[in-house]
Image (cartoon, rainbow, N blue to C red):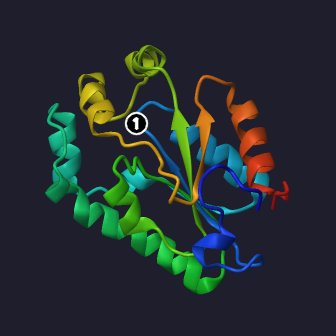
Amino acid sequence: MQSTGHRAQEESGSGPDAPPVLVIMGVSGSGKTTLAGLLAERLGWDRQEGDELHPPANVAKMASGQPLTDDDRWPWLDLVAGWIDDHRAQGRPGIITCSALKHEYRDRLARPGVVFVHLVGARATIAERLDHRVGHYMPPSLLDSQFNTLEPLGEDEAGIVVDAGQTPEAEVALVLKRLGLESTPR
């Protein structure tokens, strides 16, 4: 993998032949689901929507407009980590979405071969997306709490930053290029 300005995959302890697991991260409305779906299709990899792993109490809390606390997030992050561990144990690449807003949350998910893909966008752009999104329990009113919680990827983290203001196709092309991945659909 090419160096991305953040710690590269090989430096995180996995060999060059180990299949990666990508964690598509960012605030709600940044385009995690869209990017993950397109990448999974292009690469032929398994994909998991991290929001589907939230316990019902978390979903109800967010739907009522209350931000999650760290105590709410830890069990969910453990489920996300379990999905990652299953794929790593099977030697299978995968893509999972997870807001992973804080460094300590990403520490909970970091393993050899895990690469964070952080979708970063302007608050106004993401707010507009949320205003037009249908069928999701996360209300736009929680966007400020997500931006307030967000800690950018650190130099010690295996990952890349992607501008969420591009087209999804441009995001996919950038991720493939920056991570040195080849398109091989199933």
Judge left or right: residue 61 versus residue 106: left
Quarter of the figure that contains the N terminus: bottom right
Judge left or right: residue 168 versus residue 105: right
Name the residue rendered at 21%, 39% in the picture. Answer: 62
Q: Amino acid at mark 1?
A: Val
Corner quadrant of residue 108: bottom left
The correct choice, above or below, for 61 with respect to 81 in the image is: above
- Alpha-carbon neighbours of circle 1 within 10 Å: few (<14), some, or many (≥20)? many
Name the residue rendered at 64%, 71% in the picture. Answer: 11
The correct choice, above or below, for 22 with respect to 133 in the image is: below
Foreground pick, 49 / 22: 22
Foreground pick, 149 / 140: 149
SS of the residue under disc 1: loop
In the picture as drawn, the residue positioned furthest to the bottom comes out as 89
Residue 101 screen position, x and y as percent: 36, 46
Report which residue position mark 1 lands on.
Answer: 27
The correct choice, above or below, for 50 with respect to 174 in the image is: below
Name the residue rendered at 59%, 38% in the picture. Answer: 34
Look at the image and tell me whether residue 170 can be seen.
Answer: yes
